[in-house]
Every structure is written in C-alpha cells, then in structure tokens.
Amino acid sequence: MSHESVEQGIRRAGGALALLRNSPIRPHTFPVAAEFTNWRTEQRAWRESVALLDQSHHMTDLYIEGPDALRLLSDLGVNSFARFGPGRAKQYVAVNHDGHLIGDAVLFHLEENRFDLVGHPMVLDWVQYHLETGEYDATTERDDNSYDREPGRPPKVYRYEVQGPNAVALLEKATGAPLPAVKFFHMTTFTIAGRQVRALRHGMAGQPGFELFGPWAEGEAVLAALLAAGPEFGLVRAGAKAYSTANLESAWVPAPFPAVFSGDSLKGYREWLPTTAMGSLGGSMDSEDIADYYVTPYDIGYGGIVAFDHDFVGRAALEEIAKKPRRTKVTLVWNADDVAAAIGSLYRPGELPAKFIEFPKARYALHQSDKVLAGGELVGISMDVGYIANERAMVSLATVDLAHSEPGTEVTVVWGESPNSAKPGVEAHRQVEIRATVAPAPYVQFARAAYRDR
C-alpha cells in the first residue's frame, strides 16, 4: 500500500490538476447487488410504494467520543450546535480558511459526548486530522467502507434505508406498533424481530422514510423481518444502480470537489493525507486554476445551514461570501435529442464517438466537473448526472451563476474531455455539447415542498 502523501503526489505529477485528472482511483460504487429486479422498477418503488436500500457497505463511519468531541466538531463545522443534543442528526458541512467546501456528511449525536460522522471520507479525514494535530480531549474509531476495510471484517453496524409513501405502514407492521412521532433529522428507536433498532427520520430520494441502524450481528434478522412484512406494501429492494441515483431526486451533490489541493494553510493537511484517500477529477472543465473547481456552501444549497453563532474555520471568509453569493444549485434537464445523438454516435462507424453515457448514473470520476455554458461563456459547473426513470429525464445537479439560475433558462453542458485523460474509465472520445434547461433543485416537487413535514 502506498504511503505517498497528497503533497508528494502533487510534486510528482507536476501539479494537483495533473494528479487528479489522471488518477486511477475510480468513482465510489456501492458494494451490494447491482439490481434485485431492475433499476427502473427500483427507482419507481420509492415514488410509488416503498423501497429498501442497503447502506451498510459504501459509507465510512468516524466515531468521535470525549469531553471535547463537540468542540472539535463545532470548530470545523459551519452548522449551529446551539440545540444539537443526543438523538438528533444534521448535514455536517466543513470549509477551508477561504470559505471553500471541504465536504459534508451526516453527523449523528448518539449519546452525550459521543458522535458518529457518516459519509464519504473527505470531511471525515479533515476532522480526524484536526483531532490528531490539535489539542482536543477526544478519541476516534474509524470504520471504513467495505472496499477499504481490512478483509474479513464486517461493518460495525448495518444501515437500511426504508423510504416511499408506504414506508410508515411497512414499519408499523414490522414493529407491531404505531410509529412514534419524530421530526425530520431526529432519531427514535423501534423493536423489530426482538432487536432494538435506532432510526433516523429522513429520506435519501426526497420521499418519506427512515434510516435504520444497529449492531451488524443483528442486521440479518432485522432485514428478514422487513422483507417478510413487505409484500402487501409493495416493498422492492433497491440495488446499487438505483441507489446511486437517489440523490438526483433529492438534489444532494454527493462529491463536490474538495478545496484542499492548494494554499499554504493546507500544506500540513496535504502532507498528512495519503493519495489513496483522494479521488479522481473528471469532466470538461479545463481551467488550469484549481480554485475554479472549488465551490462554497452557498453554491450547492448549504447556505441555509451556515450559522455565524460560533467561531469555525472559514467563518470570516463565509461572512463576506454570504453578502453576495455568486452561484446557486440547480437541476439541469438535458435535451433528449442531444443525449440520444451522443449515445447514437457509438453506433456510427468512421467517427470518434462521444464519451460513453452510462445508465442510470453517468458520472465517471468521483469529482465530476463539466462546463456549463451560456452564449459560449462559462456560467457554472455540472457535478453529478444520471437518468431518473420516474421523470424519463437525464438530469444533472449543477451550480450556476445567479444570472442564469431561473427555471427555464437555456444553457449548454459540455460532455467529455479534451484532451482525454488517462483515467481507466475514459476511452478515446470527442467532446459534445448538450443543451439543457435549468429547473429547480430538488427537481421533484414532492421533495421540494412536502417530505420534510411527513
């Protein structure tokens, strides 16, 4: 296993962008069955009945415990912690000293002085680094995802997401009791198959539901009970393909480019962070200034959770950014004819085809950064793209300049790389321009207006 640091890798490659564009690290995948039925039916289930998604394997958990655990998290998080007691969770967001996003994850407040930070490693690594190099009376226990965990050791906990209009009815049958009233992003407990199950009220696809978790050894019994209760409610197990697109309906951007690859203030972190912990950069963005790839919380929909009621890394910068945000998050609905033409180019001999568009999720790097143009000028970045069978639409989540953010605005997404990078998922191809229409984020009306209140 390589012990090369990111800082060493940047020097070896001749720059951060060269290192990331040609990284052999593939996008994160979901190490569960790709499909239990087919991904179209599985996508429909969370809209029409109820879907069960297995989250046990693809996320990393960082357990933080001790008298200074909350202070550590508060020092790095843009969120308010004024009323964040045990039994609650939040979308935790951290930025660098310039106010650019490091990453986000879900933070569970499990017990007094004990937390679980769950998600992609970007923000978890940032928190762990500051604990190890700062003066905090706290400890961590890390449970990597099933790709990175040492062979033969199972996850510490199981996680099952149950969501859809029939989720509550399913859980009431599985528990044998009415569900307790619980607010969005609050936790409660159930008893299923004689096991106590902790449950977070939320929904990855913007539908009503719960995330259930408990000790790994009890997971099979809980799963069996859910499956046994499911037929009358139209329960469908969702595999990795469908699950990878759930964020497109709820408008969560899963892996924005982390702003850690430049600046003297972050050199110590880059020297601590191994290259095995970073991701790859893909897409048509071709600026040689790495700062052009960075985003702020306001760019991708987290402005509402920034709280200036405490000191944190990046606060001063965000206070200035908040006065005049540059961009905002939108959904881009790709033109069907242009998508069909790009796919059709694969079947026309004698010409270099467009970059392969994989279904249902077309992102081919962990950090996808495609140019969004208006009148030939760069006005934003498209960051995550895939097909929503429920809408029969190819969409991407993007951040665009405020002047081009009104629904109905016509823009263009540049798909493919020029020149082609050396990433293993990149074949010889040509860039194409795909027309797109700006739509709200979330794209689905229910996710925008209703599900947090259910």
Image: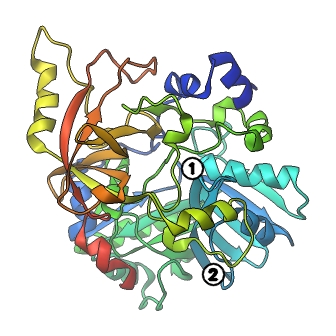
Name the element at disc 2: loop
Residue nearer the viewer, 196 or 371: 371
Residue depicted at 31% across the width and 70% down the height: 230
The mark closer to the camera, 1 or 2, is 1
The image shows residue 189, relative to residue 274, as above or below, that is below
Residue depicted at 43% across the width and 65% down the height: 161
Residue depicted at 42% across the width and 29% down the height: 286
Gap between marks 1 and 2, in whole Å?
22 Å
Residue 66 placement: quadrant: bottom right
Identify which amino acid the numbered label 2 is placed on. Gly
Colouring method of the image: rainbow
Quarter of the image that includes the N terminus: top right
Compared across the picture, whether 66 is left or right of 172 comes to right
Residue nearer the viewer, 137 or 195: 137
- Choose the circle earlier in sequence order: 1 or 2: 2
Residue pointed to by mark 2: 87
What is the x, y in percent for residue 423? 46, 22
Is residue 5 in sight in this rendering?
no
Residue depicted at 27% across the width and 64% down the height: 440
Residue pointed to by mark 1: 120
Residue 365 placement: quadrant: top left
Callout 2 crowding tier (Cα within 10 Å): few <14, some 14–19, many ≥20: some
Q: How many marks?
A: 2
